[in-house]
Image: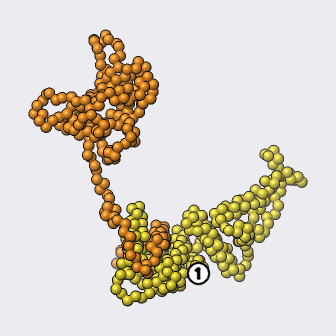
Amino acid sequence: MAACEKRRSAPAPATGSGLVEPVRAGVGGREPESEAEFLLQAGVTSMVREALLKVLEARPEEPVSFLASYFEKLVLSGPQGGAAADRHRQQQRLVRALWYVRLAHHSHRTAFHNNVSMAYECLSARGRRKKPGVNGRIYSELLRKICQDGEAPEEVVSSLLTKIQCRDHEAVPFDVFRYGVLSCVVLLEFVAKADTLYDILDDGSGMADKRVCHAVLGTLEDALGASDFSVPIRYLEAGSKLGPDCLALAMDKALLERKICSSMNREEFLKKATALFIAKVKPID
Amino acid sequence: MEPPAPNPGHGAGRPMATRPAPCTVRSPVALQVGDVKTDLARPGVAVIDVALPPAQPLDLQEIVFKNSYTAFLTVRVQRRHPCDVGRASARKWVTCLWNHCLMPSPHTEAGSQDYFSLFRHQLLCDVDQVTAVRLILRQPSPVWLHFTLEELRLYPRGQQSLQTDFPSWLSHLAPQQQPENLHGGVPDPEKVSTEVQQLWVLTEMIRANQTAARIGRFDVDGCYDINLLSYT
């Protein structure tokens, strides 16, 4: 291959394209470059490779539409001129960052971490006149948008956001960004699971007994406890406290109490349960 | 590394925390008939003497060693009786293992380099208060010129070290009690338990992922230094 490399004048750089400009080296008039070389120089190889990696990480149910929206967003992220388009572009960036965050479930730790970094980078790239970086305003907006998708009640969301939000003017480092995003995503899952728990507790009747709810939430609070969290023995302890026997005993004991039989509705239960969760979220300072 | 015992295991195992008793193992001495210096015949019998610290007679639990081409083993122990205290001599040697076969076929390799473990219940006599141990090795085959026992260790009886950092709740586990007559209104504990455990996991996750990064919202950059303040 080295023998075929000859000099040729480079073409004028293309405008408005997000692709890498092809700089070709070949003899004037003849183009002996192979197809592989062309793809490499056009930047197509790396782009397709990235797209495939994203598909593997996200494992969507509709790969074709996933890829279509991926390439669409890639095209839209190209530079567009004009000050009026700034706001529009910021909205686009927000939407794109949101899409990144939703690609992988938070339990796929590496994939989720990668996606959050890509979202951070996407939000950091600001317009030509502004300095790069994520400021508090766009970070808070992103968090609010993430929470809007789930079915978390407004109160719960706002109490979490007060803990992890940043002021508009503050610069948000990546660790804080990741923590905030993770908290929101996990909160949504927590609310969903607490909802399921309420469905179990009410036995389909729509209203759960207040004593039983208190017993269950009390056991959970006890298991979350205050002991140091680096010791694995805590997991054993929590496992034994949250086993079916202990819970059955607690619920049975609660029902034996001679209190006026009242019920707890879903909102109150969710509020109490998420209060336990939010108490463990470290506020940002 | 746990050496395998020659017999299938009885319930009496050695506790993990036991350490071998301190003893002095002498190198094997071959039995010689006739003049030591001129007679070059190899008799095929060697004796290993193990001396224990004189003031600490041992209650033997186990003898562990690695074989090195010894075919048969006889073990004799010298015991101290309570009535012997004060008497310097006339301690008797007692055979506690007689002609134990270590290699099923002395000419071949089988068992020649195995690990062996002899428990007190396999021995012929009581091995409490032992002051000295003598191992008599026999190798009738002319194939193996040198034979011995390696890594000889004696384990005393009854050393149980308590684990000190045992959490108290683990030793006070309540037995599984299923309340026999659950009230009709109690929801299924299995399902409740599953969900509650998942809630716990999510909360633990967020607690474990706390970030050390700070925005530094209320940090000041030194203009509230005490020296400067005192000038106002």
**Image hue for chain B:** orange
Residue B76, position as x, y percentages in the image = 25, 29
Q: Is residue B117 visible?
A: yes
Residue A190, position as x, y percentages in the image = 51, 75
Residue of label 1: A148
In the rendered image, the residue lying farthest to the front is B181
Q: How is the image coloured?
A: by chain
Q: Is residue A162 visible?
A: no
| Depicted B189 relative to depicted B16: above or below | below
| Depicted B190 relative to depicted A2: above or below | below
The image quarter in which residue B132 lies: top left
Residue A36, position as x, y percentages in the image = 78, 53
Q: Which one is in front, A79 or B96? A: B96
SS state under label 1: helix
Q: Residue at x 27, y 34 (%)?
A: B124
Total of numbered circles in the picture? 1
Q: Callout 1 environment at 10 Å: few (<14), some (14 to 19), or many (20+)?
A: some
Q: Which one is in front, A284 or B193? A: B193
- Locate residue A207 relative to residue A55 in the image: left or right: left
Q: Residue at x 65, y 65 (%)?
A: A59
Q: Residue at x 75, y 62 (%)?
A: A20
Dot 1 amino acid type:
Gln
| Depicted B106 relative to depicted A267: above or below | above
Circle 1 chain: A
The image quarter in which residue A254 lies: bottom left
Residue A119, position as x, y percentages in the image = 61, 70
**Image hue for chain A:** yellow
- Locate residue B141 relative to residue B171 in the image: left or right: right
Q: Residue at x 28, y 35 (%)?
A: B123
